[in-house]
Amino acid sequence: MVSENMEKAINEQLNAEMYSGYLYLSMAAYFEDQDYPGFAQWMRVQAQEELDHAMKFYDYLNTRGARVTLTAIEAPQTEWDSIEAVFKHVLEHEQMVTSLINNLVDIAIEEKDHATNQFLQWYVEEQVEEEESAMEVLGKIKRAGGAANAEQQTFYTC
Ligand code: FEO
């Protein structure tokens, strides 16, 4: 069992993860349009990961006998001023998601819901990686100079 309060909070997070997937798919579409297939592919992989994050919450609610309630997903931004602006947005978005996950952990601790707290620790670790990978790409873009050069150095030299 999870509390009604926790059920509601996890459903909201499920929506936030779906939105993240939608946002990254929108960024992928932007890069496709700008002819940056490497960046587009990076975003497609991120979008799929976000759907996986959402489905982990979906499965957890079902495992605990709680109700999954899907709600409208907000329309994502579709245009950005530059490649750097896109990845700055990714980093800011992931930092925001980290704060949402931390809030969920706070609720689990307040409610002494140890099972949910333990389940959420996977997301706590995942957010460290999510922020790190956004910072890594952003750093490469800043160092690389031009956009094509940035894509080359970021995705084709590993
Ligand atoms: Fe599901 Fe990128 O956080």
Image (tube, rainbow, N blue to C red):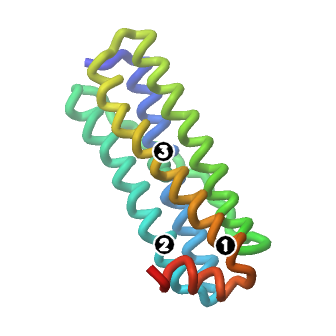
Q: CA distance from mark 2 to mark 1?
A: 14 Å
Q: CA distance from mark 3 to mark 2?
A: 18 Å
Q: Is residue 50 above or below residue 158?
A: above
Report the residue marked by disc 2. Answer: 42
Q: Is residue 76 above or below residue 110?
A: below
Q: Which label sits on residue 141? A: 1
Label count reads 3
Report the residue marked by disc 3. Answer: 128
Label 1, secondary structure: give it: helix
Label 3, secondary structure: give it: helix
Q: Residues within 10 Å of mark 1 (few under 14, many from 20)?
A: many
Q: Earlier in the sequence, mark 3 or mark 1?
A: 3
Q: Position of residue 101 (x, y in %)?
A: 49, 34
Q: Residues within 10 Å of mark 3 (few under 14, many from 20)?
A: few
In the image, what residue type sits under mark 3? Answer: Val
Q: Quadrant of the C terminus?
A: bottom left
In the image, what residue type sits under mark 2? Answer: Trp
Is 153 displayed left or right of 64 in the figure?
right
Q: Residue at x 51, y 29 (%)?
A: 102
Q: Is mark 1 within 8 Å of ligand 1?
A: no
Q: Is residue 143 above or below residue 58?
A: below
Q: Residue at x 36, y 16 (%)?
A: 3
Q: Residue at x 43, y 36 (%)?
A: 124
Choose top left, top right, bottom left or bottom right for residue 61.
top left
Q: Quadrant of the N terminus?
A: top left
In the image, what residue type sits under mark 1? Answer: Ile
Q: Earlier in the sequence, mark 2 or mark 1?
A: 2
